[in-house]
Amino acid sequence: MIAKFLRKTAETIRAAIPKTRSVSPEILEEALICADMDYDEVEALLDRLVHPITRDRLRFGLLELLPAFEPAPITQKPFVELIVGVNGAGKTTAIAKLANRYKNEGFSVTLGAGDTFRAAAIEQLQAWADKLALPIVSAKTGGDPSAVAFDAVSSALAKKRDRVLIDTAGRLHTHKNLAEELKKIVRVCGKACDGAPHRKLLVLDGTQGRSAINQAREFNETIGIDGIIVTKLDGTAKGGAIYSISRQLQKPILYIGIGEKEDDLVEFDAYSFTDSLVDPFFE
């Protein structure tokens, strides 16, 4: 499935390879940089590769760029997740997709419409809640997002729900006052439920490629990110940026978005993703 939705990235790699299909270090470097992998990562990869460059050697080298990740078992109930990211990254849609995954896995889910800055964001999440038949806690536009978060967690506790997904306003990482508001939401979640939020997920726009790294660093420094969701990978040739984002932040990519429907969110599989990038070199 991942190979299908990384078609544009694969086409970019193929375009950089001469018809001889000989994978030299120079060709490999050009192709990976065209796929938006950071130059330093590419050079580090080339330094470690044993020549001649074979499929298995390239595959192993790329996998080494991704940090090791073993998900901890989820024992908290409710398990509270705070979803952050800038405007336009597809954050609210990613929340709906994640909620749909949980629902299909048999978990009960409560949504928190914590993006009170935009009426459209509240309406969008409400529409998803109606479509997925999920309860949602919200407030009027301009309301206190921390209060929404508190009420969403408290409601889930009282009703013994399994999961809580809290939306937040799309924040520019340079807005200090918005960063402080985000810290407040984290504190208030902890008051509603010990240890909450139990996971903080950052949604990044895949079409931005490596340019999203700086905003990711800011979010991580502000509240500490536990994992990343990369959206819109089906519409970009910048799939190679996944390695740079994960390696430089030392945070796992947990999910990738591959479309607009509620089922278009898949768990990130390092092996199948890497295969999708390696295969065009050796076809």
Image: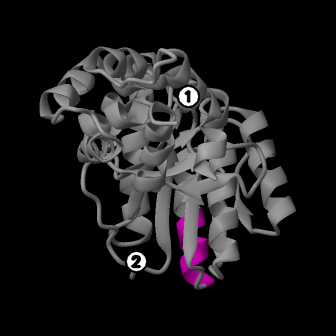
Measured from the top left, where is residue 58 in percent x and y? 30, 39
Q: Secondary structure at mark 1?
A: helix
- Mark number, residue 9: 1
Instruction: Determine the residue positioned at 78% across, 35% down.
Output: 120
Q: Residues within 10 Å of mark 1 (few under 14, many from 20)?
A: many
Above/below status of 3 relative to 23: below
Q: Quadrant for residue 9, please give it.
A: top right
Above/below status of 263 relative to 56: below
Residue type at numbered disc 2: Ile
Going by the image, does 262 lie left or right of 111? right
Viewer-closest of 223 and 205: 205
* Residue 48 seen: yes
Above/below status of 80 relative to 272: below
Q: Is residue 109 magenta?
A: no
Above/below status of 77 relative to 135: below
Q: Quadrant for residue 48, please give it.
A: top left
Farthest front residue in view: 20
Instruction: Determine the residue positioned at 65% across, 41% down.
Output: 5
For mark 2, what is the residue? Answer: 74
Residue type at numbered disc 1: Thr
Going by the image, does 241 lie left or right of 217? right
Q: Residues within 10 Å of mark 2 (few under 14, many from 20)?
A: few
CA distance separating discs 2 and 1: 34 Å
Instruction: Determine the residue positioned at 26% across, 24% down.
Output: 42
Viewer-closest of 213 and 242: 242
Q: Secondary structure at mark 2?
A: loop
Instruction: Determine the residue positioned at 35% across, 25% down.
Output: 23
Magenta highlight: main SS:
helix
Measured from the top left, where is residue 30 in percent x and y? 37, 14
What segment is highlighted magenta in the picture?
152-159
Measured from the top left, where is residue 142 in percent x and y? 66, 35
